[in-house]
Image (cartoon, rainbow, N blue to C red):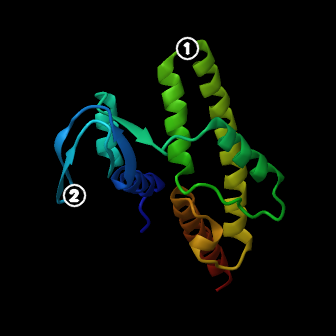
Amino acid sequence: MLASPEAYMALTRVRRLLSSVRTIALRDLGVVMVGREAINVRKGDEVSLPLWLALELRRGGYVELRDVTLRDVDLFRYYHMERTSKGGKLVDVREDLYLSAGMTIRKLGEEKTPDSLSAAERLKRVLSNMLDLRLGKLMSAALYLEARHVSEVSNVLEEMVLYTLLRRVIRSWRDSVLRYAE
């Protein structure tokens, strides 16, 4: 029996939260336990922390995250490349595309200025359109291509999970229908 897609995506989210991100300490933090290592963090230090910890420390104003957000021009560029790509192949994008885009949109929304709210809405639309394009290509790959290793289809974890689930469901459905002929 397959777990629900929500369960797989929850595991994907946990994996994202456990991944390391670079941060800059905005204040002295003292000793911070990262895994089994104790790190003395002082203001100005650049340190890699698990994303979940970095997010909590950012909320308190203790750190600034590096390289997690996505510039709007990068999202527009990915969208344009995806829209104009030929052959149904997914364009190579950042492995953390959805996380970084989501964090960028959330950050703009938190600023609550008319310009930032407008930019957040515009980026949400672009991300939604890009998701639709990539979903169509993932579905096509799951349906029509010979079984390929998931890493040949996409480098984005969320898409790898979806592709794997689609392949399983399609194979199961197809086998069930073909049993009518037995």
Residue 116 image position (x, y, % from top left): 58, 21
Depth order, front residue of 12/81: 81
Depth order, front residue of 7/171: 7
What residue is disc 1 on?
113
Q: Which mark is residue 36?
A: none
What residue is disc 2 on?
35
- Dot 2 lies on which element? loop
Residue 9 image position (x, y, % from top left): 45, 53
Q: Residue at x 69, y 45 (%)?
A: 130
Q: Residue at x 57, y 58 (%)?
A: 159
Label count reads: 2
Depth order, front residue of 61/86: 61
Amino acid on which the number 1 mark rests in the picture: Thr
* Residue count near mark 2 (Cα–Cα under 10 Å), binned few <14, some 14–19, many ≥20: few
Residue 51 image position (x, y, % from top left): 36, 47
Check the image and report above or below for 144 versus 179: above
Q: Residue furthest bottom?
A: 182
Amino acid on which the number 2 mark rests in the picture: Gly
- Dot 1 lies on which element? loop
Q: Residue at x 51, y 62 (%)?
A: 161
Q: Could you tell whether 25 is left or right of 107 in the image?
A: left
Give the Cα separation between the discs numbered 1 and 2. Answer: 38 Å
Depth order, front residue of 111/87: 111
Point out the tag, 1 or 2, that comes first from the N-terminus: 2
Check the image and report above or below for 54 versus 182: above
Residue 25 image position (x, y, % from top left): 31, 37
